[in-house]
Image (spheres, grey):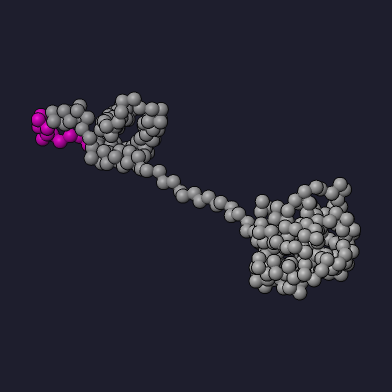
Amino acid sequence: MADNSKDDLLQLIKRVGAFLSLKFSNFPRDMNSRSVGAIAGLTLALVFTWRLLRVPSEPQRRQSKRQAPPASSSGVSTAETVNASSLGAINPTDDSRTQNVIDEFFQPVKVEKVTFFIPLQPTLGQIVRQRLSDGRKVTCRLLGVVLEESTPEELQKQATVRSSVLEVLLEITKFCDLYLMERVLDDESEKKVLVALEDAGVFTSGGLVKDKVLFCGTENGRTSFVRQLEPDWHIDSNPEITTQLARFIKYQLHISSVKLERPASNVFTAPFLEQFFGCV
């Protein structure tokens, strides 16, 4: 029994060797470590498979051993049988099983498709809402924030809307009730400001109307406007007004290149309005 097992194993190794010689005949001679590892893994798989395949064939072999060869067998038949065994004739059934094992080993590996999700950049509208903490009412000074001019005297000559702040201003009007306000010296200055805002397209979005542009003659008048409106945010460039309103307004944004010395915890500082929303 042990001799038969050894013979079967030897025949299997011969068949594997013959198949591998044919399979790798076109391969380069200098095979790398992966190729050697693949051949070693194939050999172990074949040995394991052979051990499984030989179990059901044991009864048939025992039965064939018990049967005596027929008396009428000629010497020629016996010689042919011996010659076939000595030459290692391949059983069609065993060869098919070996071929199936090798084919399964060399099947291509299926790699599942991996999907990568790239987070999208937030829109300006989303940034505005996040930075304003979903505030619903905003008051804002014009000089030095929305307009290029920084003093009421300059408004007597001209009024110019800063192009870089326009997009942010329009986004604020979509989510918030926005009021613009400024101190002016005469009625002509008011007209110049309204014309400049209208030419820039501030009133076309529907969120801001001319009635929400307020004018006063003193700085205290602007402070009174803010306290009466009770906004969630007030935007100003005057440090004195920012300090005075810190106790009454929930949040403030102070527009200045110079930071306040001791700002309250609810006061934020930025050089420009658009920079506070990450547009610069």
Horizontally, residue 28 falls left or right of residue 206, namely left
Answer yes or no: is residue 8 visible: no
Horizontally, residue 203 falls left or right of residue 135, namely left
Answer yes or no: is residue 32 visible: yes
Q: In this orientation, which residue lies closer to the viewer: 273 or 56?
A: 273
- Number of numbered discs visible in the structure rendering: 0
Q: Residue at x 77, y 48 (%)?
A: 257
Quarter of the rendering occupied by the N terminus: top left
Q: Position of residue 106 (x, y in %)?
A: 35, 40
Farthest top residue? Answer: 30
Q: Position of residue 35 (x, y in %)?
A: 37, 30
Q: Residue at x 75, y 63 (%)?
A: 157
Q: Main secondary structure of the magenta part?
A: loop
Q: Position of residue 18 (x, y in %)?
A: 26, 31
Is 244 colored magenta in this rendering? Answer: no
Q: Residue at x 66, y 66 (%)?
A: 200
Residue 188: name its quadrant: bottom right
Farthest front residue? Answer: 157
The magenta span reads 66-77
Residue 39: name its quadrant: top left
Horizontally, residue 212 falls left or right of residue 58, namely right
Q: Residue at x 59, y 53 (%)?
A: 119
Residue 231: name its quadrant: bottom right
From what the image shows, is residue 7 above or below residue 224? above
Q: Position of residue 192 (x, y in %)?
A: 73, 68
